[in-house]
């Protein structure tokens, strides 16, 4: 049953803590299975991929057909209607423009001691993107993962996308083409993650893996982390809407349901200082659930994990929001910028009633790959920085080494690292004519 809470009640803290701690994801223990799959792919390469794809995706492949050919991609994307093609191109244009502005700059300077210091940024050489497969896959996620990689300067970008029964989504392939993806493989599951991490005869390994997936994919990403980088382990989608009395209840209801329809484990929360709005939004949700196409999914999400919280004022709303640290935070209030200053833990902010979260999923520009399960307290959404490495730079002149070297020697001696200190002392002695 949907949670209804008020900060005026004596049991609020207990119930709010219960809401924060609710387990929303049914994650079966698949680690042993995933470990075996990864070991199999490492040992047998393409043969393991082909066998596992036949088993799980009902698709017979050969080493030559693991990858989509350019002709196959051309034929499939030709099926995309003009209207959808134009929408994807428009989204890609905006996403690319946003991420170009994220690119950090190199820097170098000489400090007062005469040492030259700085840093430079460089892209990972190769990245792999996991895309959930079948007709229900999301081309928007391809854009959100692939475009930042290409903007960062990744030279080789490979996609793995399962095609159960051989059925591919033309929109996904078009999104890959628009984003500049170099290779597309029709494989999925833990075996695809293993192939990207360790390589096979037909698939070269990558340096970083991003993209969403099921429990098997998540477990595989955890296991290969360290061999390669990963973006995050994402949980069910979530939205928090903070709204004042001057809102259309149906708009707020639709924003809540836009996440509830994702997944039965998704969470939609409303915080308001208006009991009347809370009641009106709840009624609007119920009315929309009568006709929504994905109403069964949205109904279970709303009933099991939805919540309406009535607060005394917006300061209290911001305090609760920071404890929730939501993936998506809509501020449907009179002065959203002012309230946003106090909402410091959120994956993405959507300011004002005219900025529905759904815009962020597709064409807003900012990335929609965001931290979930309260991890916005300590992490950020996907960006070009996920595909970049920062290398520090230092150059000592004889004068700089003379100025700061003795301190390094003392610290090395205090840590009983003799060779460290001697490597500095040998140069200082040279300067002193010894």
Image (cartoon, grey):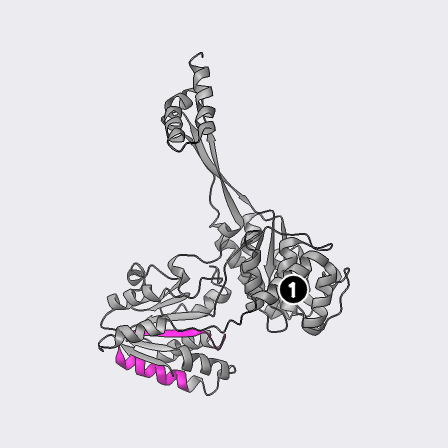
Q: Which of these two is toward me, 240 or 423?
A: 423
Q: Judging from the image, what secondary structure is the residue with disc 1 in?
A: helix
Residue at the far top: name it: 433
Q: Is residue 178 magenta?
A: no
Residue 78: percent from the left, percent from the top? 69, 67
* Residue tagged 1: 173
- Provide the residue span drawn in magenta: 262-286
Q: Residues within 10 Å of mark 1 (few under 14, many from 20)?
A: many
Q: Quadrant of the C terminus?
A: top left
Residue 148: percent from the left, percent from the top? 53, 54
Q: Which residue appears at 37% of the width and 31% of the height? A: 414
Q: Is residue 275 magenta?
A: yes
Q: Which residue appears at 48% of the width and 60% of the height? A: 367
Q: Which of these two is toward me, 433 or 422?
A: 422
Q: Which of these two is toward me, 259 or 97?
A: 259
Q: Quadrant of the N terminus?
A: bottom left
Q: Left of 334 or right of it: where is 67? A: right
Residue 119: percent from the left, percent from the top? 47, 37
């Amino acid at each position: 049953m949907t949670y209804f809470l008020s900060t005026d009640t004596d049991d609020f803290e207990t119930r709010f803590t219960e809401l924060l701690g609710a387990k929303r994801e049914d994650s079966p223990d698949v680690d042993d299975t995933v470990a075996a799959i990864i070991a199999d792919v490492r040992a047998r390469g393409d043969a393991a991929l082909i066998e596992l794809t036949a088993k799980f995706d009902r698709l017979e492949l050969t080493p030559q057909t693991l990858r989509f050919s350019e002709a196959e991609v051309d034929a499939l994307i030709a099926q995309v209607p003009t209207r959808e093609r134009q929408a994807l191109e428009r989204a890609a244009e905006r996403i690319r423009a946003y991420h170009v502005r994220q690119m950090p700059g190199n820097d170098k300077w000489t400090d007062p001691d005469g040492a030259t210091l700085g840093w430079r940024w460089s892209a990972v050489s190769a990245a792999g993107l996991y895309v959930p497969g079948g007709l229900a896959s999301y081309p928007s996620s391809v854009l959100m993962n692939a475009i930042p990689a290409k903007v960062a300067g990744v030279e080789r970008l490979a996609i793995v996308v399962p095609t159960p029964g051989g059925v591919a989504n033309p929109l996904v392939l078009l999104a890959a083409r628009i984003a500049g993806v170099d290779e597309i493989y029709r494989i999925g599951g833990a075996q695809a993650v293993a192939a990207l991490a360790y390589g096979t005869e037909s698939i070269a390994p990558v340096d970083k893996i991003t993209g969403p997936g099921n429990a098997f994919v998540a477990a595989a990403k955890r296991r290969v982390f360290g061999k390669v980088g990963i973006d995050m382990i994402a949980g069910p989608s979530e939205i928090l809407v903070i709204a004042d009395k001057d809102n259309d209840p149906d708009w707020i209801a639709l924003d809540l349901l836009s996440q509830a329809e994702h997944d039965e484990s998704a969470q939609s929360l409303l915080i308001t200082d208006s009991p009347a709005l809370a009641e009106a939004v709840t009624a609007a949700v119920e009315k929309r659930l009568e006709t929504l196409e994905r109403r069964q999914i949205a109904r279970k999400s709303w009933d099991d994990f939805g919540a309406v919280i009535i607060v005394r004022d917006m300061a209290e709303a911001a305090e609760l929001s920071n404890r929730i640290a939501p993936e998506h935070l809509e501020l449907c209030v009179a002065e959203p910028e002012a309230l946003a200053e106090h909402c410091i833990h959120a994956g993405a902010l959507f300011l004002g009633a005219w900025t529905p979260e759904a815009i962020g999923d597709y064409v807003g520009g900012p990335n929609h790959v965001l931290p979930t399960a309260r991890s916005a307290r300590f992490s950020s959404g996907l960006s070009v920085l996920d595909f970049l490495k920062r290398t520090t730079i230092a150059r000592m002149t004889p004068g700089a080494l003379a100025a700061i070297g003795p301190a390094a020697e003392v610290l090395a001696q205090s840590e009983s690292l003799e060779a460290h200190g001697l490597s500095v002392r040998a140069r200082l002695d040279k300067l002193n004519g010894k």
